[in-house]
Image: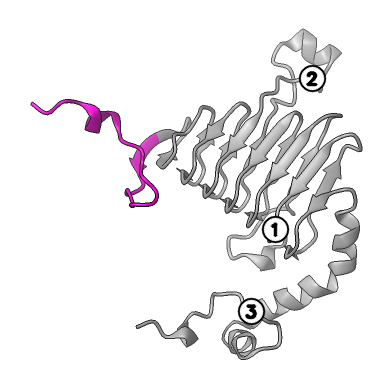
Amino acid sequence: MTDRANQSDDLPEALLSADSLRQASAMPWKAGNELRRWLILPLAWWALRGIEIGAGWRFYGLPIIQRHRRSQIRIGRAMNLRSTARSNPLGPNHPVIISTRRAGAILTIGDDFGMTGGSLVCDQRIRIGDRVWVGANAVICDTDFHPLDPETRRARPLEGNTAPVEIADDVFIGMHALILKGVRIGERAVIGAGSVVSRDVPAGAIVAGNPARVIAELPTTPDKPGRRSAESNRPKR
């Protein structure tokens, strides 16, 4: 049987509660994080102007939000952003950056999204599903930023190639990962720390490396069937 008192890593249901006091006693830095979170609320509301966002969001430190006035940012419920070194032991090296850089760009994020440090940069379209967690200092972008051809780069330095990024439900992206333009990541996939993802990732796959490759699959469960590998599809000898 699990001892509820030992589950001190869980966020308390209420700020003034037995769970909250127990957590503050065991891990006082978390109490400090919660206090600072409440103190920045007025500034956080100002940062969110022009953005459609659901209830229950939590900001630990102010993110950097750069929204083109003719772009759209839509965010679901219970977003959790950690932007200070004190807010996560992995030490984000800068605040979370959320940026839409062009007119017509559309950034859509589902419910229960979590991100520590790192950048989310949208020139064209990025769609992120529900319950997607992004590890410390990861980058997701749908653009090359700059053209590859030297002459084009000199003449039009900000017109790099773009292609939409789609990240399905329940994806976990490890710290320092890089998700590049045109990538589609299937539901429940896991992206290993430090991976560079430049091509599609199947549902339920675990990928790692540069470039990222499938190294394993999540176990199959009755309600969430895993992806069958090419090996499992071969006839038995």
Q: Which residues are magenta?
A: 214-237
Q: Position of residue 36 (x, y in %)?
A: 78, 74
Q: Is residue 148 above or below residue 126?
A: above
Task: Find disc 2 in the rendering and name its residue.
Answer: 159
Q: CA distance from mark 3 to mark 1?
A: 16 Å
Magenta residues, dominant SS class: loop
Q: How many marks?
A: 3
Q: Is residue 235 above or below residue 116?
A: above
Q: Amino acid at mark 2?
A: Glu
- Whichever of callouts 2 and 1 sits on the residue coming sooner in the sequence is 1
Q: CA distance from mark 3 to mark 2?
A: 47 Å
Q: CA distance from mark 2 to mark 1?
A: 33 Å
Could you say which disc has been placed on residue 77 in the image?
1
- Whichever of callouts 3 and 2 sits on the residue coming sooner in the sequence is 3
Q: Label 3: state its secondary structure.
A: loop
Q: Is residue 163 above or below residue 48?
A: above
Q: Is residue 152 above or below residue 183?
A: above
Mark nearer the viewer, 2 or 1: 1
Q: Position of residue 10 (x, y in %)?
A: 55, 75
Q: Amino acid at mark 1?
A: Arg
- Whichever of callouts 3 and 1 sits on the residue coming sooner in the sequence is 3
Could you say which disc has been placed on residue 165 in the image?
none
10 horizontally vs 141: left or right: left
Q: Residue at coordinates 70% horizontally, 23% vertically from top-left?
A: 162
Q: Residue at coordinates 77% horizontally, 71% vertically from top-left?
A: 37
* Image quarter hosting the N terminus: bottom left
Task: Find disc 3 in the rendering and name its residue.
Answer: 13
Which is more toward the observer, 37 or 228? Answer: 228
